[in-house]
Image: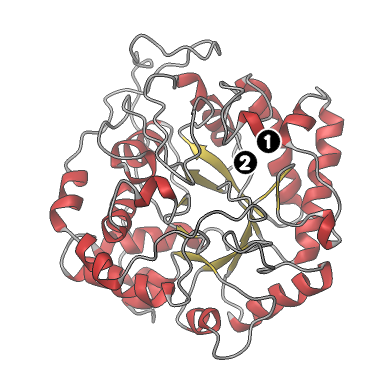
Amino acid sequence: MLTMASDPIEQRRLLSRREVLRGVAVGSAATLLASCVPAALPSASPSSGAPSPAPSPEPSRSPASPSPSPTVSATPGLSLRQRIASLLVVGFRGLTVTTGDPVAKAIEAGLGGVILFDRHQNSGELRNIESPEQVRTLTADLQTRAGGRPFLVAIDQEGGLVTRLSPKYGFPAVASEAEIGATGDDAAVTTWARGMADTLASAGVNLNLAPVVDLNVNPQNPAIGAIGRAFSADPDVVARYAGIEMQAHRDRGIRTAIKHFPGLGSATANTDFGVSDVTQTWTGTELVPYRSLIGQGLVDVIMTGHLVNGQLDAEHPASLSRATVTGLLRQQLGWDGPVITDDLQAGAITAASGFGEAVALALTAGNDLLLFANQQTFDPDITPRILDLVEQLVQNGTVPEARIDEAVARVARLG
């Protein structure tokens, strides 16, 4: 997620409850569930930025066996609503939290986590970050309200332009991925990564929505290359430096979420504000960092991107595509850990799907954690609104209850 909150944009239209319910269409989800899984993984091609003439299959191998779907007994004592709540990561407003605040009520209802931002995207006013001491107090309070159960405090701390804990609030400066990647020095990358992890640990953050493992295929890409969010165009360099960063975080007890699967590096638009279609520019080479990092056992979470990739699914954005999330990421790349969506309020999603339809598709595609930044549109009651929606989706059979339990079990692995 990009969302540079210090640059306010025109306020997005707030979706009404009627629009939410209108999006709950069994037929839409049924269409997704019936969609084809790719028969074979697109082959890796040289990092030229040119599309492959046609995806070619890997050598034949058995797909990774999915773990059995957990049953309700996997989460004893938790109601359906509480299980759904544990799958949500939501943005909120406030430098502090007091009893009665919407986010406090959401935590009481079982909310899985929050995401912190420095400023409101639309107004530029302070949102969650003012100083190191204030952030430590805020995150400690959030954890106390969670009562000792696992609770995610997430942030986008990539370095460079996407640095929420920045010097303007008293935190150390963090070079961008492009700057540190250009050094070609593993020791420099290690120092950089450890410094970032130390900052996050001291602030009480336990999930960094980073590193970006997109390849710098298009240097003019407004969401990646043009603003220094990629280590390199070389997939092996990206995998090596991302691995160093991930290990540094793990050493400090912080989880990471690599992004934006299956690859946003060749895009020509920013998915925060509109649809980005990489059908003609994406190649299988962009999967190399994912394959490498999964193979090394370094991955905690994978974030799906809102990009459109017709090579994989001609109908749905990657984040809402069962062919991409379940077929490619899980069955072909063998990832059976947690998957988180990019912001489900992003322009690429609201432009393509109704809110309710997007949530249904995200869950049936195979995502486990649903991210609502609550930035482009702000709804203080977004958590109960989503809980009502997903409960309805389960009750009417659009989302199987077993899918909820499978997601809950995966998220539980984060501890």
Amino acid type at image mark 2 = Leu
Crowd tier of the residue under label 1, counting other residues whose Cα lies within 10 Å: few below 14, some 14–19, many 20 or above: many
Image coordinates of residue 377 in percent, x first then y, are 46, 63
Farthest residue toward the bottom?
A: 99
Question: To which quarter of the image does residue 245 belong?
Answer: top right
Look at the image and name its color scheme: secondary structure
Helix, strand or loop for disc 2: loop
Question: To which quarter of the image does residue 190 belong?
Answer: top right
Question: To which quarter of the image does residue 129 belong?
Answer: bottom right
Q: CA distance from mark 1 to mark 2?
A: 7 Å
Image coordinates of residue 376 in percent, x first then y, are 49, 58
On screen, residue 149 versus residue 406, left or right, reads right
- Observer able to see residue 27: yes
Farthest residue toward the left?
A: 27
- Image height of 145 relative to 88, above or below: below
Q: Do the residues under discs 1 and 2 have CB atoms within 8 angstroms?
A: yes
On screen, residue 215 versus residue 194, left or right, reads left
Amino acid type at image mark 1 = Gly
Mark nearer the N terminus (1 vs 2) = 1
Q: Name which residue lies at 76% across and 45% down.
A: 248
Q: Which residue is mark 1?
A: 243
Foreground residue among 75 and 84: 84
- Image height of 124 relative to 274, above or below: below
Q: Name which residue lies at 51% across and 24% down.
A: 266
On screen, residue 341 versus residue 202, left or right, reads left
- Image height of 137 relative to 344, above or below: below
Q: Name which residue lies at 51% across and 82% down.
A: 102
Q: Which residue is mark 2?
A: 298
On screen, residue 359 versus residue 142, left or right, reads left
Image coordinates of residue 392 in percent, x first then y, are 22, 71
